[in-house]
Image: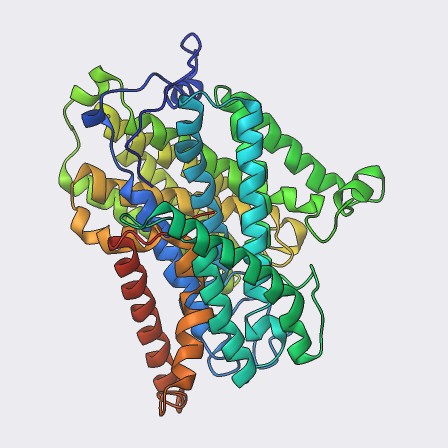
Amino acid sequence: MSTSAHPELLAPAEPCDPAARAGARAAAAPRAADEVRRALSLDALRGFFLLLMTLGFSIADGVYPAWMYHRQEPPPTHAFAEIAGLGWRDLAYPAFLFTLAAAIPISFGLRVARGAGPAQIAKASLRRFGLLFFFALIVAHSSGYWIGEYSALSQTLSLVGFGLLCLVFTRRPAGMPPRLYAGLRGFGWVASIAYLALSPRLYGQHFDLARRDGILAELAFASLVSIWLWYATRRDWPLRLAALAATVALSLSAQSEGWVARFWWGSPLPQLFEFAQLKLLCVLIPGSFAGDLLMAWMHPEPAGRRAPAHWSERRVLALAALGCASAPLLVVGLYQREVFATALACFALCGAALALVRDPHGDGERLLHALTRLGALWLVLGMLLEPFEGGIKKVPGTLSYYFATAGSSSLLLAAAVGVVDLLGRRRALRWLAEVGQNPLVAYVLFTLFLDPLLDFVPGMAGFLRGSPEEQIARSLLSVALVAGLARELTRRGLFWRA
């Protein structure tokens, strides 16, 4: 996520504790343009998890061993099963939520800097919710997965839906006349509404709010809640931690009969959201803390910017290696249900990482220090909660699932910051960052565009669809094509925005 504007921080008197000081710096006065940094590490992390999700979308059902699929949806039937544990595909979604929350202090901090008050923030957040939910509806009314069939009709609808999303969500390209852009976008909105109303009749159904992409619908709700919570607590980390504690308390209390359970599992608008989705705050709030830290680093204090680096390259690379090791350690250990051994290994990894970030000098090292400490906290908390709720699960999401993945995501972000920002090796992750800067288009490039398009190309529908080895090769090629297309759109300034 990047910025060229300079947020004005509404900072109060300097808070006494380090966490509050970091939050206050995220709201401090703007600096000169040459002092504004780009958080390419966050974009790169988002791009990585988008491609990981794409790989999951492209893998055929019932072909591979169980570890290739969601842990609670094992082959061959992929029906839901009460199995504790994680698969690699279970890691991508909460990590993507983490990056969504981390971007909010950066993007909405700009609005606050430009003088936006509560009414403007509420309006912007509701607009984003509406656009993301509309996006979820178009995707689900276009995708063969949600339609319930894979046929020439569903593939055609996928391509039509992709085209409509292009018209509605593409930001005005440089050089396009505003009147032409407004006309195309207006046509896109009218055509999209007609599409939602009429296209289900082609396969014997009708428009239904319940037919929506579940991931995007939850992202819409998560975005709305995260923005409001961040705005209310942007200068008060303890208050945000209190909201996290209240979320955990509600989640625990909802497991027994009573008024909390009736509130938690109910909703006045069940087709739009459920209060139980507030459990997502267990990964969103950690993400927002990371975003505050990035915001403070992007707009450093003059003295902090001048401080020289102190850590050696070997030390930073060792920290990055530990951060990258956290995700496979978590997934492999909990998939195999070696819970105690995995917990000990995670504790040891966190201890080693904390030892490496001791004695930070300069704002870059302090950023790594803070991200690592928070990541260790969430990961340890997740492992301590693992035996609870019948073991870690994505469906239904357990407290251990959200905290452990938040911890792993924070450590991965620290790894990316170390390599990209401290060591200056931006080329290593720039291609991932370019994918991550265009998340909406990257999310649907495979499901609504590439996969159905290839099915219409003579000879491509059956290409590399024989043996499992051929099918995994097709999946990897699909991911590479998605990465290349998303990067090209980013480089040409063709962004989809909500």
Q: Is residue 457 visible?
A: yes
Q: Residue at x 24, y 32 (%)?
A: 37
Q: Residue at x 36, y 91 (%)?
A: 458
Q: Is residue 386 visible?
A: no
Q: Residue furthest front?
A: 179
Q: Relative to 478, does residue 37 appear above or below in the rendering?
A: above
Report the side of 350 relative to 197 (left or right): left
Between 120 and 98, the residue placed more toward the observer is 120
Between 237 and 5, the residue placed more toward the observer is 5
Report the side of 181 relative to 261 (left or right): left
Q: Residue at x 56, y 23 (%)?
A: 118
Report the side of 72 relative to 267 (left or right): left
Residue 15 picture location, percent across and down: 43, 12
Report the side of 280 relative to 432 (left or right): right
Quarter of image, res 201 = bottom right
Residue 238 picture location, percent across and down: 53, 21
Between 247 and 376, the residue placed more toward the observer is 247
Residue 494 picture location, percent across and down: 32, 54
Q: Relative to 393, does residue 71 appear above or below in the rendering?
A: below
Residue 414 picture location, percent across and down: 32, 41
Q: Residue furthest right?
A: 258
Where the N terminus falls, by quadrant?
top left
Between 8 and 234, the residue placed more toward the observer is 8
